[in-house]
Amino acid sequence: MPLNVSLEEIYETYRMTEKEHFDIRAVTLGINLLPCTSDNFSQLCKRVEKKIFTTARQFVKRAEKMDARFGIPIINKRLTITPAALVLSGALTGAAAEDRKRVVDFAKLLDHCAQEVGVDFLGGFGALSEKGLTYADQTLIDAIPEALGSTEKICGFINLASSKAGINMRGVAKIGGIIRDLAFKSENAIGAAKFVVFANAVSDNPFMAGGFHGIQEADNVLNIGISGPGVVRRTVEAAPRDLPLDEIAEIIKKTAFKITRAGELVGQELARDLGVRFGSLDLSLAPTTAVGDSVGRILEAMGLERVGTHGSTAALALLTDAIKKGGLMASSHIGGLSGAFVPVSEDVGLSEAVKIGALTIDKLEAMTTVCSVGLDMIPVPGDTKTTTISAIIADELAIGMMNNKTTAVRLIPVPGKKAGEMVSWGGLLGEAYIVPLHQENSDYFIWRKGQIPAPVTSFRN
């Protein structure tokens, strides 16, 4: 059904776009590759290439047409595919070295497809492994450093925990070394920015690096990721300093409603133009390096001297909940992650708080209990032990498992860098100071491997 949009709403959208950095952060076309599976690797690759080209060849052009039509910038055009371990499983022979090469070659094929259709990223190079690692999962994980390190546009993920299954600690123990190898095999550790570890991963996430096309989704689905921390920040800053917090929440809800309406219009029209199903609208405040486009600055506008100080978790809880409530009133398609992201390197407010010591790894972990993702884009010292990386991941997955929410980890061990030093990637990935970590080891805990059982709250059906 077409949306009824008033002239006043159009003007409001124009003002948000021109003055407050509002944009459509990502339009993401999901493609089901399960019909392409084959026990013949060459045949599989031909089918996948044909499917992607057939489905996505007009995608970027039509997204740009919507950008011009509505005047709302569409920053990224992306594809997601069925988790690659599922697509590849039938084409693996059981010969480890040969199969690892096939996985890397498959990543390079996907990268070529992404280049040809003109998208910014292709997500879904990963596995759903919360209850255990299949042979295909293990092979794909082993190939991650080379596969992501040798490609430009491919993003990977692995789901190692859920509230129903618990935490796959064997996978957690293994992934610490994989992340470090990936960081060391790529320039300035950038490869690790393209890989996410999840608990309770969602199948309709339009954001990278963790997006993938779930097996329960329709064949071709368009998911939209909208953003607008600059819009929300300006709204909160304009409020009187003595305005009660419940009224601040109402202001944020109304702002989220306006943002969602604009995103819904673009998403519905683009899906119709492409002839695919409109899936979900992810209303996430995703910060950028642009001045004022910061979630950290929103929390400070609520009354915190610096994000990371006492009260930061409560302020973030208010923000995340208000964003969700406002979005739900504006659209029946709210999905994905929806809430507020706290990626350290991409948010100037967060990065500056790390620099002065106001925001620590422990406070970041506490804030992930109420944000929409988790420990995101956090650079750590290059000499961090792999067991420490695994232990940080385990902590974050435990938060997701126990609270029945999606949590994710993007840690980036930067070779040659120590705590307090600066690392810069430029563009949307920004820059940040290396976050100090605890020095006490967690080795024996990680080496036990096994499975952390699901909590009793998971048995509700």
Image (tube, helix red, strand yellow):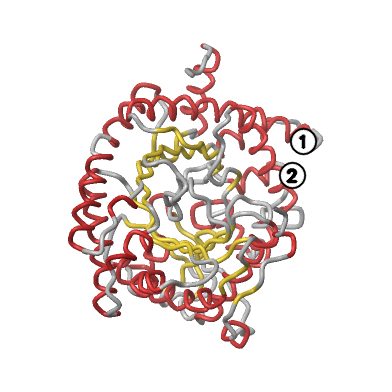
Question: Is residue 424 visible to the viewer in this orientation of the structure?
Answer: no
Question: On screen, 171 above or below 318?
Answer: below
Q: Position of residue 394 (x, y in %)?
A: 60, 71
Does residue 369 appear left or right of residue 159 in this picture? right
Question: Is residue 298 visible to the viewer in this orientation of the structure?
Answer: yes
Question: On screen, 384 above or below 202?
Answer: below
In the image, which disc is placed on residue 261? none
Q: Amino acid at mark 2?
A: Gly
Q: Quadrant of residue 275?
A: top left
> For the image shown, how many numbered marks are present on the structure?
2
Question: On screen, 212 above or below 140?
Answer: above
Q: Position of residue 262 (x, y in %)?
A: 50, 26
Residue lying farthest to the top in this orientation: 7
Q: Position of residue 59 (x, y in %)?
A: 29, 36
- Identify the residue shown where x is 71% and y is 59%: 459
Q: Label 2: which residue? A: 303
Task: Identify the element where label 2 is drawn.
Answer: loop
In the image, which disc is placed on residue 241? 1
Q: Position of residue 95 (x, y in %)?
A: 27, 80
Does residue 208 appear left or right of residue 77 in this picture? right
Task: Identify the element where label 1 is drawn.
Answer: loop
- Identify the residue shown where x is 23% and y is 40%: 54
- In this orientation, which residue lies closer to the viewer: 66 or 105? 105
Q: Amino acid at mark 1?
A: Arg
Q: Earlier in the sequence, mark 1 or mark 2?
A: 1
How packed mark 2 is, by other alpha carbons closer than 10 Å (few <14, some 14-19, many 20 or more), is some
- In this orientation, which residue lies closer to the viewer: 355 or 366? 366
How packed mark 1 is, by other alpha carbons closer than 10 Å (few <14, some 14-19, many 20 or more), is few
- Tag 1–tag 2 contact (CB < 8 Å): yes
- In this orientation, which residue lies closer to the viewer: 191 or 215? 215
Q: CA distance from mark 1 to mark 2?
A: 8 Å
- In this orientation, which residue lies closer to the viewer: 50 or 10? 50
